[in-house]
Image (tube, grey):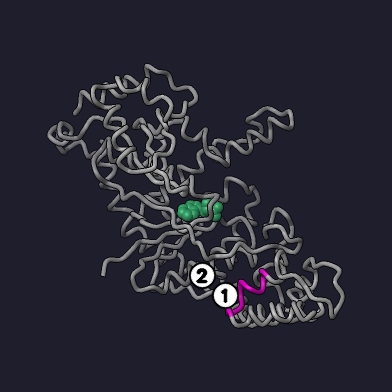
Amino acid sequence: MTSTRFLTGITTSGTPHLGNYVGSIRPSVRASLRPDVEGFYFLADYHALIKIDEPSRIQRSTLEIAASWLAAGLDPQCVTFYRQSDIPEIPELTWFLTCLTGKGLLNRAHAYKAIVDKNTNAGLDPESDVTAGLFMYPVLMAADILMFDAHQVPVGRDQVQHIEMARDMAQSFNHRYGQHFTLPEAAIEENVATLPGLDGRKMSKSYDNHIPLFAPRAQLQKLIAGIVTDSRAPGQAKETEGSALFQIYQAFATSEETAALRQAYLQGIAWADAKQLVFERIDREITPMRETYLALLNDPAKIENILLSGAAKARKIATPFMGQLRQAVGLRDLRTQASNKAAKTAKAALPVFKQYREKDGKFYFKLVEPVGRVLLQSLGFDTHQEAAAAIAALQTPAGLALPSLQARLQAQNGVTESDISAALDQLAASA
Ligand code: TRP
């Protein structure tokens, strides 16, 4: 059986809540139990430094997230479970990737752009409060992924762009130095719920509408009692549609249990009774884990040891791989002869056409420079063949078809006609 490498990290910037459990911890622990999956699970504490400047909070969060994963059933014997900052090869790889990532590519990262837009709208300097660390976030994340040849990275939609960037970096590196990296893919989990919070919006720390995963029972009950409902009285039929309480229940219940609650809503169950039912259902799943969690929190040495052995296991891969990469880029032992042979056969870095299919079912392509800058971006074609024909037309003879295809292409900011024809010429010359 061929196994899939599955990798996921959680930033150690806070205490896990029910939304993190349902959206990330529970599905990733389930995936770790599949025999065809080889899992890499890590605490992204270098990422935490980007947004947290309280040392004790980083330490506490690392402990809590590690304990949560273990309490939820992650088995460090079956997966590689480690702390990012125990792997010095990761920042080293980050630097290698930094050196071939176009600054323009990072300028287009959603998370960075969102802050720039927010600053601009507030009349502030666009770069206000933007550290170089925040700007470089996607490169560090790419290093996490590429270091372990991950095939599948389960992420929410907001993180898909980061995986695409990691692919672009892997491609640039492979282009320049030969085939070293596997191209990762985002695994979007369709049937994983996004949990609403107490106020009905997405459960999130930043909205302050969250329920801590391992809140004590009494607090869990109290928080659930505070979930927004409408003002329908006992005996009046209730709507399941748009009911945060119902959605939260659904994330924990079997389909029979969910159907029963739907029926109870129709029959006018009192909100207080529905809340009690939801509390009991969640508590049934959480209580056994909570005990393990609390025991682990009281035994930090145990977690530390688990993480250190995880790091040793991870470095069995990372250290030799990094050695191979150092060799590839030319950070070499001076006693060895420079191998010109390899240099001659390595292809010069060329722009590439990349074809892909979008959610809308249409076929697209883009022309990307080795540093990751997008030169051309097509609109959607109905078939793969049409997209391929357009790419072929662009390449033979170089650039002549460009004007006739203009209507199918989107202009790219800052890219000139001559950038494009230079890239097409370069491709034609290498063909
Ligand atoms: N960005 C993720 C988060 O916000 C954490 C993370 C860091 C990650 N590196 C990763 C996730 C690599 C998946 C793969 O929690």
Where 202 falls versus 101 (above or below)?
below
Q: What residue sits 51% from the left and 70% below the top? A: 303
Where 151 falls versus 117 (above or below)?
below
Q: Position of residue 294 (x, y in %)?
A: 62, 76
Left or right relative to 137: residue 396? left
For the record, the magenta segment spans: 247-255
Q: Amino acid at mark 1?
A: Leu
- Identify the secondary structure beneath mark 1: helix
Query: Which residue in the protein does label 2 denote?
Result: 303
Rendering quarter of residue 298: bottom right
Q: Amino acid at mark 2?
A: Ile
Dot 1 or dot 2: first in sequence order is: 1
Residue 344 visible in the current orientation: yes
Q: On residue 296, which mark appears?
A: 1
Q: On residue 130, which mark appears?
A: none
**Foreground pick, 272 / 339:** 272
In the image as oriented, which residue stretches furthest toward the left?
Answer: 341
**Magenta stretch: includes residue 253:** yes
The quadrant of the image that shows the N terminus is bottom left
- Identify the secondary structure beneath mark 2: helix
Where 89 falls versus 389 (above or below)?
below
